[in-house]
Image (cartoon, rainbow, N blue to C red):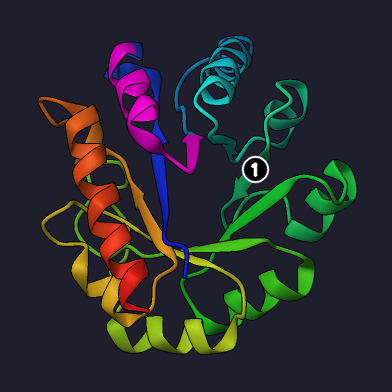
Amino acid sequence: MKKYLYLIADFSYGEDKIKAALAAGLDYIQLREKNISSAEYLLRAKRLREMARHYFAKLIINDRLDIAALSKADGVHLGQEDIPVKDARMFLGAGKIIGATAKTVNQAKEAVKAGADYLGSGAWFPTETKKDAVHISEEIYREILKAAPIPNVAVGGITRDNCQKPLSLGASGLAISAGILKALDPGAETRKIRRLLEKWENME
């Protein structure tokens, strides 16, 4: 079964590092920008859209339904405090990808019912991206996987060294940020993680 590699990026890491990761082989790249203007967010989204298309990756915009639509991104990822999945689906239409954060079984069930295409569940480990993120237990993750028959990407502080646990429990893929973009060679790190995911694909 396909295991997805999903990079969560912002331009503070530098465009060269993002491009190196894309060139090494990503399935998805999510743009997650904080504390910038909407105008700048849209410019960055359009720039990343062109980069992602060149390397055959899907572009997902974090939180911002308007930026996703205006930049012609492939989809949006919505947290529990963002626009509801049902409303986002009505706005974007059937052709766009909608991901939803699900940290509980009820959240997972609601997201599936509302039309989400995939779930992101965590946080698995401490993460600099979201310092207040609540840790997810293995038991809850198993229950979420049972309750929601759509792909589930593990997220939160994941690196090549610690990603075996969510994969062993049945994660459909890995969402990684600093674990790739803070590497000395993001392209090489991406390729190493891709090879690891291919091993898991062959095991299933």
Magenta highlight: main SS: helix
| Residue hosting label 1 | 76
Task: Give the farthest residue toward the front.
Answer: 202
- Asked whether residue 23 is drawn in magenta, I would say yes
Any magenta on residue 172? no
Quadrant into which the C terminus falls: bottom left
The kind of residue on which mark 1 rests is: Val
Badge 1, how many Cα within 10 Å: few under 14, some, many 20+?
many
Q: Which residue is more in the foreground, 74 or 104?
A: 74
Viewer-nearest residue: 104 or 6: 6
Span shown in magenta? 16-30
Kindly identify the residue that appears in the image at 30 percent across and 76 percent down.
203
Residue at horizontal 49 percent and vertical 82 percent from the top: 144
- Residue 75's x, y, as percent? 68, 41
> Percent from the top left, x then y, of residue 119?
55, 64
Q: Secondary structure at mark 1?
A: strand
Residue 107 at least partly seen: yes
